[in-house]
Amino acid sequence: MATAPAAAPGQTRTPAGPGPGSGGGRGSTRARGVRPRPLFARANIPAGAASLIWLLIVLVPLWCMLSWSVQSRDGFLDNGPLSLPRQLTSGNLTTVLEGGFTNAFVNTVIVTVVSVALTLVCAVPAAYAVVRSTSRFVAGAFSVFLLGLAIPAQAVIIPVYLMIVRMGLYDTKAAIILPTVAFGLPFAVLILAGSLRDVPGENYEAMTLDGAGPMRTLWSLVIPMSRGSIVAVGIYAALQAWNGFLFPLILTQSEEQQILTLNLWNFQTEYGVNVPGLMTAVLLSAAPVFIAYVLARRWIVAGLAGLGGK
């Protein structure tokens, strides 16, 4: 039997411990009597306290909206804003529905759907051209799109108003849709261009060798591999159109073209504000947005993170 070599003069032999693969991990730690740290010692108490504070900051307004929406106006004024509802009522829902909410809801849905469709139809080919084209004109157009991110709508509302009036579109749904799409395109093109750059170049070359033209490549390769970013851009465009206020306020006038953000003003008069009715209308108008976020949150995060369709 082979024996271990003797230690050299002046050296001390150390007993061989368990090697990396000899199971000397957690079991050996317990064998040496080292106990794991208790849970309270491992917890990040300041971060947990900050999270609880932030949770309260978020939940208190939500609780107020829900509480106020089921109270009568007199009960809200008598009990105070933070008190529990003592007498529940459904009269606020009747007040909201009789105040033109249904018409405003339908108008908002039409404006949102058309705005999203036009944004995607314009943004996807534009981003594809930015990524695949080597033309200086395309590069300059992309710079113009990026410049649009720095121009707020409030700065150009007067020229937009004059253009809409001269085209004969004032007080129509097109007067809301066209500026909404125009100001949403820069962000949409930026997000989609970043997603399309993640598509491997070998895939484009394979499509070219198969005889596919630009349109077939766009339809068969680019759109399926970038569906996450496309959904994220669509959700962003829908939120912009659904919550739009400036363009409907300036470019429409009649109640027939009123959308939800303007309909909320009906609960504010020169004599006061119907807070319970207003909160009920806010909850009803925010419900579709919340449902859309719950259903598409994975695509939103993936698209904004630049993951494309992965």
Image: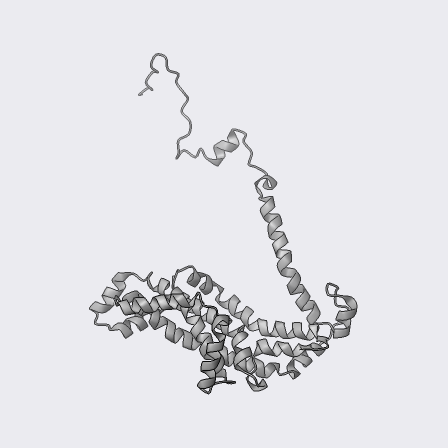
- Which quadrant would residue 2 be assigned to in this image? top left
- Can residue 157 be seen here? The reply is yes
In this picture the colour scheme is: one colour
Residue 17 position, x and y percent, is 42, 27
Residue in the foreground of this view, choosing between 189 and 148: 148
Compared to 95, does 30 lie above or below?
A: above
Q: Residue at x 34, y 67 (%)?
A: 142
Closest to the observer: 240 or 69?
240
Q: Position of residue 62 (x, y in %)?
A: 64, 64
In the rendered image, residue 95, in percent from the top left (x then y), is placed at 68, 80
> Compared to 27, does 59 lie above or below?
below
In depth, the one of 1 and 6 nearer the eye is 6
Residue at the top extreme of this rendering: 9
| Horizontal relation, residue 87 to residue 221: left or right | right
Left/right placement of residue 117 relative to residue 286 reads left
Residue 281 appears left or right of 135? right
Q: Quadrant of the N terminus?
A: top left
